[in-house]
Image: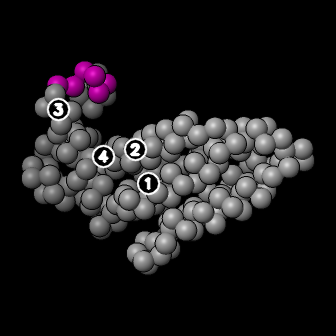
Amino acid sequence: MSRHERAESELTLTERARRRQLIEATVELVADRGYAGTSLSRIAERAGITKAAVLYHFPSKDAVVRAAHEHVLTALTTQVGAAVEAADPAQGPAAYIRSMIGHLREHPRHTRMITEAMTSEAAERQPAERWQPLAQILEAAARATGERTPLDVRTLAIIIGGGIDAIVAEQLTDPSYDTAAAAEELVDLVRAKLSP
């Protein structure tokens, strides 16, 4: 097993710290310069180490970008998951929308990292991975609110995802855009759809 294939738990404290440093440097670079403007040399420079040291931890640019993408997705899904878990099922969609938009507003570099990783050749995209968790939240909310009409949760989840993307994108181009108010508008639209 190569050092690149070792589990996180098998790495030394120093190796884990260096990997975190490289991941953070990569998030910053991809957010600032885009995927194409990020290289192993620039990652090394941003982290204050040699390119050989980067290659010790990651076999390629794509590998470190994937690790950075996973890092920001984990941060996002952890926060959103906690918000949804804390809400009762009927309020799950609202908690999802508010926490998703709130996290992305508070972490614009994460937003740019996610966007860049999704559009780069390094990304492995599975659309269902995005809409299925929200569809489950919507199903639980529909049951909790007594929804009697059939609900196409897949389509509704895709629409909500698109709305979130548009709100976050607008805030990236116009930092004064009120994403909290926009999130409430989206919550109101979803509530209307879920009302019995």
Q: Position of residue 59 (x, y in %)?
A: 27, 41
**Residue 11 colored magenta?**
yes
Task: Evaluate if marks 4 and 2 touch, with contact meaning CB atoms under 8 Å apart.
Answer: no
Q: Mark 4 or mark 3, which is nearer the start of the sequence? A: 3
Q: Which residue is rendered at x = 28% and y = 22% of the image?
A: 9
Please tell me how many numbered marks the rendered image carries: 4
| Mark 4 residue type | Val
**Tag shown at residue 103:** 1
Q: Position of residue 163 (x, y in %)?
A: 62, 64
Q: Which residue is rendered at x = 60% and y = 63% of the image?
A: 184
Q: Mark 4 or mark 1, which is nearer the start of the sequence? A: 4
Task: Return the residue found at the far right.
Answer: 149
Q: Which residues are drawn in magenta?
A: 7-12
Between 62 and 89, the one nearer to me in the picture: 89
Q: CA distance from mark 2 to mark 1?
A: 9 Å
Q: Residues within 10 Å of mark 1 (few under 14, many from 20)?
A: some
User: SS of the residue at dot 4?
Assistant: helix
Residue occupied by mark 4? 64
Residue occupied by mark 2? 75
User: SS of the residue at dot 1?
Assistant: helix
Q: Residues within 10 Å of mark 4 (few under 14, many from 20)?
A: many
Q: Residues within 10 Å of mark 3 (few under 14, many from 20)?
A: some
**Residue 150 colored magenta?**
no
Mark 4 vs mark 2: in front:
2
Mark 2 vs mark 1: in front:
1
Q: CA distance from mark 4 to mark 2?
A: 17 Å
